[in-house]
Amino acid sequence: ITLGKQDVDGMSRFTGYLTPEARATIEAVWAKLAAPGMCNPTDETPCVDGTPSEQTVRRDTRSASQRSHDGLLAGLRGLLASGQLGQHNGLPASIIVTTTLQDLEAAAGKALTGGGTLLPMSDVIRLGRHAHHYLAVFDHGKALALYHSKRLANPAQRIVLYAKDRGCTAPGCDVPGYRCEVHHVAEWATTHRTDIDQLTL
């Protein structure tokens, strides 16, 4: 399965082949979550469990492809929210988003995820309604104090690095933050410091 780069409108192409087992699994998920009236983002309270009312089904004007997209999104969102994916790089598997305070307050502009995806602010706000929140505070791009006495970066420091570095900082590298390791700017064996101003992705 390949997730293509974002187009200028923010959309991404999703292509590939599925094994029979993967296809059967998606069919079962779609039978529930992509049915007419289910997981409709235009509903004030989308039906994601149970059975949609007849009125909700009649009001659903999405194509089958749109319903499949929305059903897949609802299933993946539910999986992330369940906490059953465990940890990735010391953090719970989750969507990590960075933005400016000005854009957030104005509900405008775009944010960047730890995977390198640009998200419209409307999506960030919608995601935030169902999320566990962390706040990293910066002063003109410099992370304010966050210190740690052990060699490995702690989860809070990793979140700040996603926000500060937004991905690999090596020259010419464009690897997104989710796939980066944390490195000490000056060797830990020399400094014995794991402070946020001495860490990078």
Image: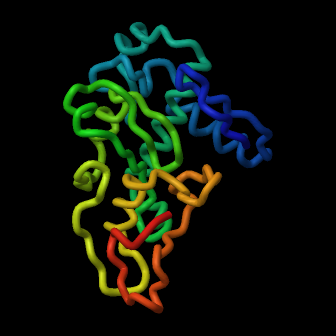
Q: Residue at x 23, y 39 (%)?
A: 101
Residue 195 lies in quadrant = bottom left
Q: Residue furthest left?
A: 105
Tally of numbered tags: 0
Residue 161 as seen in the image, left or right of residue 171: left
Q: Relative to the observer, which residue lies in front, 192 or 51?
A: 192
**Position of 67 relative to 184 (above/below):** above
Q: Relative to the observer, which residue lies in front, 109 or 144?
A: 144
Residue 3 lies in quadrant = top right
List x then y, in percent, for residue 152: 43, 81
Residue 7 visible in image: yes
Residue 135 visible in image: no
Q: Residue at x 61, y 25 (%)?
A: 7
List x then y, in percent, for residue 112: 43, 41
Q: Residue at x 26, y 55 (%)?
A: 136
Q: Relative to the observer, which residue lies in front, 52 or 13?
A: 13
List x then y, in percent, for residue 4: 68, 35
Q: Residue at x 45, y 58 (%)?
A: 93
Q: Please, which colouring scheme is shown?
A: rainbow
Q: Relative to the observer, which residue lies in front, 56 or 197?
A: 197
Residue 108 lies in quadrant = top left
Quarter of the image that includes the N terminus:
top right
List x then y, in percent, for residue 132: 27, 53
**Position of 127 relative to 146 (above/below):** above
